[in-house]
Image: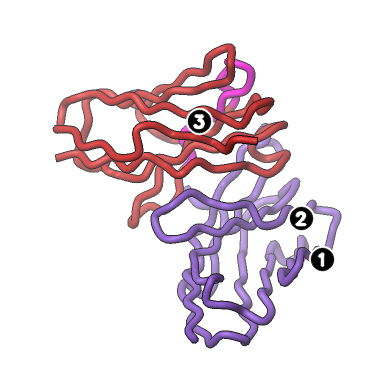
Amino acid sequence: KAGVTQTPRYLIKTRGQQVTLSCSPISGHRSVSWYQQTPGQGLQFLFEYFSETQRNKGNFPGRFSGRQFSNSRSEMNVSTLELGDSALYLCASSLLGMGLSEQYFGPGTRLTVT
Amino acid sequence: SQQGEEDPQALSIQEGENATMNCSYKTSINNLQWYRQNSGRGLVHLILIRSNEREKHSGRLRVTLDTSKKSSSLLITASRAADTASYFCATDATGTASKLTFGTGTRLQVTL
């Protein structure tokens, strides 16, 4: 069974631009969660989607948004990028949901904002 | 915000020794999970322990959970250089619709 894939793996953007990251979950998994990881703040939960609906949301500004498609693939978008958005963005898929069953993580997208 | 705090923040041991990491959390939970992260990569799920369980084993891993003290420990026995990684606990707090919150992590270094 193929694992969770994330594209792109690395990205460099300029302040003020917007970015879209993609995540393909393991086949059959309906839950996709997104996390931001930085040295200063650690792993912070962004949002979770389950069957195309946002089920949980973390404490991030509205510049961070996401969606999930009918095939469970998910995208997250960050608009008006700030230097502080530089981070490793991880997505994870699970069968029942992030808290109910184990999550399988993708390799992450490393975003650098200059 | 972080629900879990891991202790110690960093741990350095020699191959063959046991490594113990602790996690404390603040609210009631449904379950607690441990994950491993190799440098700059995605996380790997290690073990899930439910709130009504006290101890769980998986290979060289032993996890305990004390809900009265709101704490958990992860023991890695007979450590290997390949165990070098950061270890995170994550909690599913009750009443949060299965939202998972990660701790700050313990950085484990296993030397030959």
Gap in Å between the C-alphas at discs 1 and 3? 30 Å
- For the residue labelled by badge 2, is the local secondary structure a helix, a strand or a loop? strand
Name which residue lies at 14% across and 32% down: A14
Q: Is residue A90 left or right of residue A4?
A: left
Please state the chain letter of the residue tagged with numbered disc 1 in the rendered image: B
Q: A23 or A1: which is nearer to us?
A: A1
Chain letter of mark 3 equals A
The numbered mark at residue A47 is 3
Q: Are marks 1 and 3 on the same chain?
A: no
Of A15 and B7, nearer the camera is A15
Give the residue at x 66% y 57%: B46
Mark 1 and mark 2 lie on one chain; the one further toward the N terminus is 2
Find chain B in the image and tell me its colour. Answer: purple
The residue pinned by badge 2 equals B49
- Identified by mark 2, the residue type is Ile
Q: Which residue is mark 1?
A: B55
> CA gap, disc 1 to disc 2?
8 Å
